[in-house]
Image: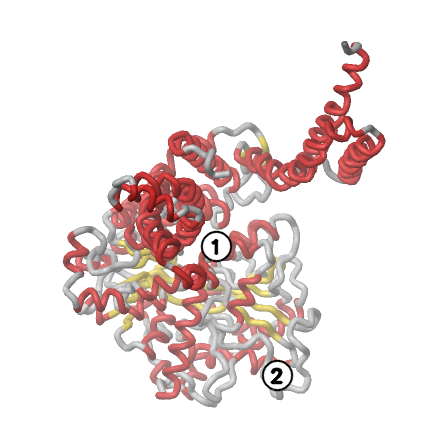
Amino acid sequence: MTPRRPARPTNRLSRRQFFLRSSALGVAGLSLPAWLTACGGDDDDASSDTGGAPATTAAGTSPATTPAGAGEGSLFFENWPAYIDPTEDGATGTVDRFTAATGIAMRYTEAYNDNTSYFATIQPVLGRGDTIEPDIIAPTSWMAGRLINLGWVDPLPLDQIPNAANLRPDLQMPAWDPTGEFSLPWQTGFAGIAYNLDVTGRELTSVEDLFDPEFAGKIGMNTEMRDTIGLILLGLGVDITTIATFDDAAAAFDKLEAAKSDGQIRSFHGNDYFDDLSTGNFAACVGWSGDVAQLQLDNPAVRFAFPEEGVTSWADTMVMPKGAANRDAAAAWMNFVYDPVEAAQITAWVQYVSPVDGVREELEKIDPDLANNPLVFPDEATLAKAKGFANLSDEVEAEFDAAFSRIVGA
Amino acid sequence: MTSPQYDTARRRPELVGLGTLLAAGALLVAVGARWVSGPLVPLALAIVLASIVVLVVAAVAGGPEIRRRLAPYGLLKPGMLWLALFYLAPLVTLLKQSLSTLPSRFAVEAEFDWNLDNYRDAFSDFGPQFTRAFLYAGVATVLTIAIGYPLAYVIAFRGGRYRNLLLGLVVIPFFTSYLIRTIAWQSLLADSGPVVGALDTLQLSNVLEAVNIMDNGRLVNTPAAVIGGLTYNFLPFMALPIYVSLEKVDPRLVDAAKDLYSTSTAAFRKVVVPLSLPGVFAGTLLTFIPAAGDFVNAAYLGSPQTTMIGNSIQDQFLVQNNTPLASAMSFVLMAIITVFVLIYSRFFGTEDLA
């Protein structure tokens, strides 16, 4: 098995190109989903070639490969950018290994930029009882909970996913999916401060650094409400695991609003912050641990700060939208990525916290350094500082969303 | 002397023409706005078709006098029906949507219940965005005139045989997608990009900071960048109409003015400018109206403090999925623009435009 992560010089160019491309398309996707919704996900096609994994599998990897888009027997997974190991530099990515192992053709796209805007594109379709094209989508846990409550997802055929037994114990029967039959986590991780050392000129250690007037107009804030508000609340010393009413979090909204009107915030971003951070448009922003680990390979000045006040932890899940056409193929995929050997390959590249038990042992074999990275295998001290945002009731969530979209949403 | 019967008979063709026109238009609006559905749709379309047939039959069967009287209605019909289906019907749908309420948070279909709160919210929650939209669009329009007028003047009067080439050069950048060009500006104006680098080297950034064009070392994500983007993107819509009206100006008029002891400046001011005003007027409409509703420039070149009403409408329509509020905002925007245009055309007049 080839370790993929170490920054071999040949790796650098391709990774940089990959990030620049994917972030540029992410930006383009920001305002486009709207027009494109009507066209039934043309934007997905645009992102399919940013993905590490090509939509159609490499010729010759498997004689049993059916052409992509063949409908029955092929699989369509819509995920976030930079979230899987691609086929490059002589290494075979997970998608291609899956196709080689099972003979199932797969289309893998990176249409997610943030949960809210993705939800907006599927809501009119699923809300009318129609089906969307992807067989698997990757909402964050709270959004998975919303989809489950709305009845817009199908239960997973868990009997066909024996490897689901490898799910980390702390993620079994989670609050968003109390019966555990609708979702399997894809990756979990932390939202903290991503910053560019060349611009800041100093190490960032605190949430307060985001509000340092020195960085006026050079701060990015995430459009994921729970990550941005959660981080600000942690900075204010509020326990985000017990938030129950809007008043509990009002101070963070006020602080964000003030930062916006003071011109502290340059822009609100989804998963498309790579470019701004790497080029120095952002001094710092609310970023995700694994993204930063990968960006760092290109630009060593990009850092991830684990603020002393704590970080928010989150989980992105795999769910099957209602009426998904390829249930068996989806089950085969989930079973495949829940094999610790395969999961370790993904972890080696994405550097998030894997939801699969046994990954650490596998990773010891291919990348011992990473196996000891507290951001990938959090120790007690890290876990003590990582807080998940409380599960909000429907009415309270509506209040939070309305307040947040008033600040963010133009 | 004409008898009463003859009078009625003479009036009938107009009644037939007007009647079929209005009936067909109303039916198409009803179909387009989805007031009729299911088997009634083919029926309605059949009646529309029948009204056209009636008009044609009446024209063919009647004498030359009847044909003459029916002609205006026949000629109006294609345009009117097009407008009914593709302008009035969507407008009516939008109006109805703006008076509706979403029954629940994630509901797809809004329910029509004369909900005027949407209009109240559009004003109370998005006042700054409306103000910014008209401010930025206004400044950008003035800038396009300032840049576009000399440009068109030079091409029209000094272009010589290179006129068409120069015009082509104005238009060529616009063969590239609007979005791509705007994103390209984002890279050009980036903090570590070539423009800011050059300004720093030339020590000009302090000057620009002083006049509020730059802000803490950044050029992009400022109001200046948004206005600049609007100006750049809408320049041809100003330059081309001005060129068209300048090109029609006979240079001998200027010579005549000079023969009458006018200075060059006075000749330009009293002869060329008035004759080119229709172009400026058309260019202003073509620039100001779309610029006021634009959201691309503010999205890519702006910051959270420079969002325009177009961004808010886009966000409400496509991210928040709040179609009633978004529809109300669209209507308010349309109303304000209409008032602006009416006032503007009152002062500049449109009679020369045709």
Circle on res. A101? 2
Nearer the observer: mark 1 or 2; the answer is 1
SS for callout 1: helix
Q: Is residue A288 above or below residue A61?
A: above
Q: Could you classify mark 2 by the number of other residues whose Cα lies within 10 Å: few (under 14), some (14-19), or many (20 or more)? A: some
Q: Sequence order check: which comes first, mark 1 or mark 2?
A: 2
Q: Position of residue A334 (x, y in %)?
A: 57, 72
Which coloring applies here? secondary structure
Quadrant of residue A275 in the image?
bottom left
Residue B269, how many percent across, how many down?
A: 29, 41
Residue drawn at x 58%, y 65% is A136
Q: Nearer the viewer, residue A104 or B130?
A: B130
- Tell me if B126 is positioned left or right of A134 in this view: left
**Amino acid of disc 2:** Ala
- Give the label on residue B334, or none: none
- Viewer can see residue A397: no
Q: Nearer the viewer, residue B321 or B12?
A: B12
State the residue lying farthest toward the front. Answer: B259
Q: Chain of mark 2?
A: A
Q: Is residue B220 above or below residue B261?
A: below
* Local secondary structure at mark 2: helix
Q: Amino acid at mark 1?
A: Ser
Mark 1 neighbour density, 10 Å: few (under 14) some (14–19) many (20 or more): many
The picture places residue A149, in percent across and down from the top left corner, at 56, 50
Question: In the visual, does A217 lie left or right of A72?
Answer: left
Residues marked 1 and 2, same chain = yes
Residue A117: image tag: 1
Mark 1–mark 2 Cα distance, whole angstroms, equals: 34 Å
Residue shown at 35% from the left, 88% from the top: A9
